[in-house]
Amino acid sequence: MAIKVLGVVGTPVKGETNTEILCQAVLDGAKAQGDDVEVEIVCLAEMKIVAGCTHCNWCLEKQTAEKFCSQNDDITKSLYAKVVEADALVIATPVYIGRLSWLTAAFIDRLRALFEGRYYGIRGPLGGVLMDKVVTGASVAWIRHGGVETALMSLMQMAAILGLIYVTPGFSFGAGGVSAAPLGEYGAVGKDKFAMRNAHNTGARLVQVARIIRAGKEALRYTPAYVR
Ligand SMILES: Cc1cc2nc3c(=O)[nH]c(=O)nc-3n(C[C@H](O)[C@H](O)[C@H](O)COP(=O)(O)O)c2cc1C
């Protein structure tokens, strides 16, 4: 069975972006771990997204297998299903004022529907579809010390709250890089050699841990159960 890795790119900029390049490097590192690894990248900027979570609590009371969220947008129509299917997630964000971007935050907030929702959440019949998925972060700032680590740490905090398992390659909080270059030059993170190599290593480690979790679950015949 394939190991599925989903990259979600949270820059609001369309076209070639630094965040997508770094995310793709993580996915390349994942893919290099074997022919059974399937990767997919989704750019939130290309999707129709109504809003982040509006705390309407529809998902807590009315969520079904067919409908994840009350909002009728592309997260509900297609992205939730991809997250459910994935064994591993790469959440990639540009640094905005020393933290993750508003668009990345909107996506993360919408994951509440998969953590607490009536069907997909921890009290539902599946035991919580986010539990035991592995996740890592990728982040690009303009300058070194401009906020990559604080953005990555907010992704680690997200993992803690959502029951996800955050993976690092060791030595760093995940994949981080800088895009400092003459204004308007997109893709500059691709020239940050350390960033690209570390991103590759991050993707490799993500798949290694996903494999360990899958093997462990199979050996234990385990399905996640929320400890009440
Ligand atoms: C609103 C806003 C806030 C930003 N804040 C920071 C910051 O705090 N530190 C930094 O180094 N770069 C900052 N940047 C620059 C972006 O992080 C940087 O250009 C990044 O490479 C953009 O990624 P993208 O090409 O994927 O959109 C900011 C950019 C914007 C638009």
Image (cartoon, rainbow, N blue to C red):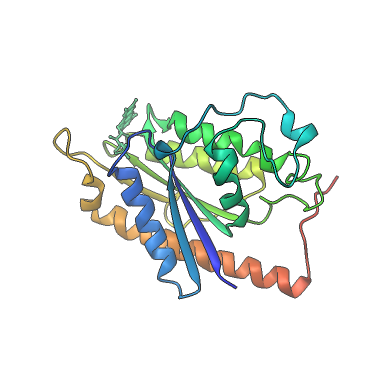
- Quadrant of the rendering where the C terminus is positioned: top right
* Left or right side of 186 for 120: right
Find residue 13 and report its horizontal and vertical position in percent.
33, 34
Q: Quadrant of residue 217?
A: bottom right
- Quadrant of the rendering where the N terminus is positioned: bottom right
Q: Residue at x 67, y 24 (%)?
A: 55
Q: Quadrant of residue 180?
A: top left
Relative to 83, is 10 above or below?
Answer: above
Q: Residue at x 37, y 34 (%)?
A: 95
Along the line of sight, the residue nearer the viewer: 70 or 117 = 70
Q: Quadrant of ligand 1?
A: top left
| Residue at the far left in the pictured view | 182
Find residue 206 and report its horizontal and vertical position in percent.
50, 61
Find residue 191 and report its horizontal and vertical position in percent.
20, 52
User: Residue 74, can we see it?
Assistant: yes
Along the line of sight, the residue nearer the viewer: 125 or 100 = 125
Q: Residue at x 76, y 42 (%)?
A: 64
Relative to 165, is 146 above or below?
Answer: above
Find residue 35 and report its horizontal and vertical position in percent.
46, 75
User: Residue 169, can we see it?
Assistant: no
Q: Residue at x 63, y 44 (%)?
A: 160
Number of residue marks: 0
* Left or right side of 198 for 223: right
Along the line of sight, the residue nearer the viewer: 192 or 3 = 3
